[in-house]
């Protein structure tokens, strides 16, 4: 058993009681004869010695609890903001996140909530909830689509620039074999490997299926068909760019 002693002090009796009750709820105990009222100049300081066992406690400079966790990592972990509001709370099992995970904004409003299984997010976006700081729920589907639309719009614009340069150079508009070649700056998550997207946030181009693929945070994959068109000769012309479809395509 690993026991530690901590002293909680405050001149604010209401705040003092709140801190002591918080520690008791976490499993700490009051030390025998550990309560004391200290008179200092014109102030009164409330003091209590508490005992914690098999856990780690960390405090801010003003005495507010910052962090609580079990030493063996199994059980509940909790972290607080300096204003006393919880920052996050999670459960661990066998040294991995396993169970409910909740994060809060500093104003006490929930920011996100979902579950972990064996250290990984359990379920897709429909099973995790996200909020803005004012408490309004986020529509993660719309956010994912907006992010994708921005990347696809950049690719389309890059292809138009590429085609214009080809017209000036060789007298014919055409697109590159790989649509990413039309972009000078690639998006976050871009990989130049000739495969489908395989990790959260990845963007790739598969030359076999001629599809641009993107994996969202919920592990679903979406694709856009890409036809480079005719790149040389008198019939040179730009191709076509498909709309968003679920899956890797074929």
Image: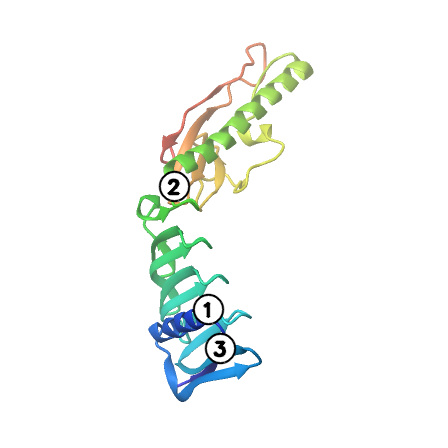
Seen in the picture, residue 28 relative to 214 is either above or below; the reply is below
Q: In this figure, which residue is indicated by the disc labeled 2? A: 138
- What percent of the width, then of the height, locates residue 129? 35, 47
> Disc 3 or 1, which lies upstream in sequence?
3
137 above or below 24?
A: above
Secondary-structure class at tag 1 = strand
Counting from the top left corner in percent of width and height, residue 58 is at 49, 72
Query: Residue 198 vs residue 161: left or right?
Result: left
Asked if one can make out residue 178 in the rendered structure from this viewpoint, the answer is no
Check if mark 1's residue and mark 2's residue have beta carbons within 8 Å.
Answer: no
> Residue 209, image x and y in percent?
43, 31
What residue is shown at x 47% (from left), y 71% (from top)? 12
Residue name at image x 55 percent, y 37 percent: 187
| Quadrant in which the C terminus is drawn | top left
| Mark carried by residue 9 | 3
Q: Secondary structure at mark 3?
A: strand
Q: Residue at x 42, y 82 (%)?
A: 50
Q: Rounded to the nearest whole Å, what is the CA distance between mark 3 and mark 2?
A: 40 Å
Quadrant (top left/top right/bottom left/bottom right) for the N terminus:
bottom left
Query: In front here: 180 or 28?
Result: 28
Front residue (pair 82, 221): 82
CA–CA distance in space, label 3 to label 1: 17 Å
Packing grade of label 3 (10 A; few <14, some 14-19, many >=20) is many
Relative to the observer, which residue lies in front, 44 or 236? Answer: 44
Looking at the image, tell me whether mark 1 or mark 2 is earlier in sequence order. Answer: 1
Q: Nearer the viewer, residue 195 or 246?
A: 246
**What numbered label is drawn on residue 67?**
1
Q: Residues within 10 Å of mark 2 (few under 14, many from 20)?
A: some
* Residue 244 makes an appearance in the image: yes
Secondary structure at badge 2 equals loop
Given contact means CB atoms under 8 Å apart, are the residues at marks 3 and 2 in contact? no
Mark-to-mark CA distance, 1 and 2: 28 Å
């Amino acid at each position: 058993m690993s026991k530690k002693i901590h002293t909680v002090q405050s001149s604010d009796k209401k705040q003092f009681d709140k801190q002591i009750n918080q520690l008791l709820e976490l499993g700490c105990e009051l030390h025998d004869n550990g309560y004391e009222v200290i008179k200092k100049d014109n102030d009164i300081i409330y003091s209590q010695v508490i005992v914690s066992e098999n856990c780690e406690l960390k405090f801010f400079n003003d005495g507010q609890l910052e962090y609580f966790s079990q030493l063996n990592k199994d059980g509940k972990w909790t972290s607080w903001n300096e204003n006393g509001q919880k920052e996050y709370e999670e459960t661990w099992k066998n040294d991995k996140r396993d169970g409910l995970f909740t994060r809060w904004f500093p104003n006490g409003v929930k920011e996100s909530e979902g579950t972990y299984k064996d250290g990984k997010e359990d379920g897709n976006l429909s099973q995790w909830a996200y909020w803005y700081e004012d408490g309004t729920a986020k529509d993660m589907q719309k956010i994912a689509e907006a992010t994708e639309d921005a990347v696809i719009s950049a690719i389309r614009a890059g292809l138009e620039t590429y085609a214009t340069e080809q017209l000036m150079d060789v007298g014919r508009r055409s697109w590159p074999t790989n649509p990413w070649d039309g972009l000078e700056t690639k998006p976050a998550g871009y990989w130049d490997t000739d495969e489908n997207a395989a990790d959260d946030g990845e963007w790739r181009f598969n030359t076999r299926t001629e599809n641009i693929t993107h994996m969202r945070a919920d592990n679903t994959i979406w694709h856009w068909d890409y036809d480079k068109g005719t790149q040389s000769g008198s019939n040179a012309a730009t191709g076509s760019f498909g709309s968003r479809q679920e899956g890797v395509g074929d």
